[in-house]
Image (cartoon, helix red, strand yellow):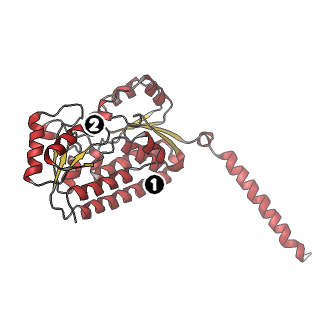
Amino acid sequence: MRTGYPALAALLIVLAVSAGLLMRRASAPAEKAEGGLRVVTTLFPLYDMASAIGGGRAEVSMLLPPGMEPHSFEPRPGDMARLERADIFVYTGSSMEPWAGDLVRASANRELLAVDAGRDIVRAAGPSGGAPDPHIWLDFDNAKVMARTIADAFQTKDPENAEAYRRAAAQYVEKLSALDLSYRNGLARCRTRNIVYGGHYAFAYMARRYGLEYSSAQGISPDSEPTARDLAALVEQIRREKIKSVFYEELASPKIAETVARETGAGMLMLNAAHNVSRDQLRDGVTFFDILGSDLAALREGLECR
Ligand SMILES: [Zn+2]
């Protein structure tokens, strides 16, 4: 009989484990089985943060169509329908998405948690004392605050998984610290500290953080045409400081940078403010860290850093 005992014990263990699994499955809340939190974000940095924090528990989508320049974006009727089905809507504030508040107010979804991820961020002044700079995510300390704000919303809506969201947010914040350090080291010793940007005013937070100077051809939105005097000032700066490269932006025509480059013989490099991504980038799962890593490489080349 002794030889039969372990087999019986093993059988009992298998039965007990199966029963436990069945009971656990039966008691799991029904809504979790349906795919977890539904999260809609406006801009790419928010999409990246929400995706990382949600892990496999959230279905995150971006309201901006891929490749769309966000400053001129106007929501379409279908966007309202997406909010009706969402648990959480994340945006950065009224200067970047002036339409977001209206969308939330017009929504019939009483359960929707609308999160202004920029609510705790102190805005830096815009160009020549104008409206504040809305590109808050380009200071990585701001990005940390935004990630934590988003994680708070996830915890509020899905307290059962609060610990997982907190952990994922902490990991995201750690990656931002590493990125910040690579910028600090990578931009410490450069021949010039002047970023000449043939696009709209977007990199002031980054420039301030790493002790760089920043001149842009346009104001805080890319829809304004630069004046001949603005262009002449950039050309003059490039010549005076023997700057090797002019930077251009990701989703608008590079024609301003092309004009300046032609006039001065400077090269051209893309500096991506990560507002949004292309359809291909979205499909390939490009991250905020991929984009900002490429930016660091471009800055190091353009500013001639060692
Ligand atoms: Zn912008």
Of the 4 image quadrants, the one containing the C terminus is bottom left
Q: Describe residue 228's horizontal placement relative to residue 299 as left or right.
A: left
Query: What is the x, y in percent for residue 82?
Result: 47, 30
Residue 116 picture location, percent across and down: 34, 38
Specify whether residue 54 is in view.
yes
Image quadrant in which the N terminus is located: bottom right
Identify which residue is drawn at 85% across, 67% down.
8
Q: Residue at x 30, y 36 (%)?
A: 93
Residue that appears at 48% across and 36% down: 87
Q: Amino acid at mark 1?
A: Ala
Going by the picture, which residue comes out furthest to the right?
Answer: 1
Q: Secondary structure at mark 1?
A: helix
> Dividing the picture into quarters, in which one does residue 211 lie?
bottom left
- Dot 2, crowdedness within 10 Å: few (<14), some or many (≥20)? few
State the residue lying farthest toward the bottom: 2
1 vs 2, front mark = 2
Residue that carries the numbered disc 2 in the rendered image: 253
Residue 168 is labelled as 1
Whether residue 167 sits left or right of residue 140 in the image: it is: right
> Of marks 1 and 2, which one's residue comes earlier in the chain?
1
Mark 2: amino acid: Ser
Q: From the viewer's perspective, tell me whether residue 262 is left or right of residue 283.
A: left
Comparing 77 with 12, the one in front is 77
Residue 223, placed above or below residue 126 = above
Residue 76 image offset from top left, x and y in percent: 41, 24
Kindly identify which numbered label has been placed on residue 276.
Answer: none
Relative to 273, is 5 above or below?
Answer: below
Give the total of numbered labels. Answer: 2
Label 1 CA crowd tier, 10 Å (few <14, some 14–19, many 20+): many
Q: CA distance from mark 1 to mark 2?
A: 37 Å
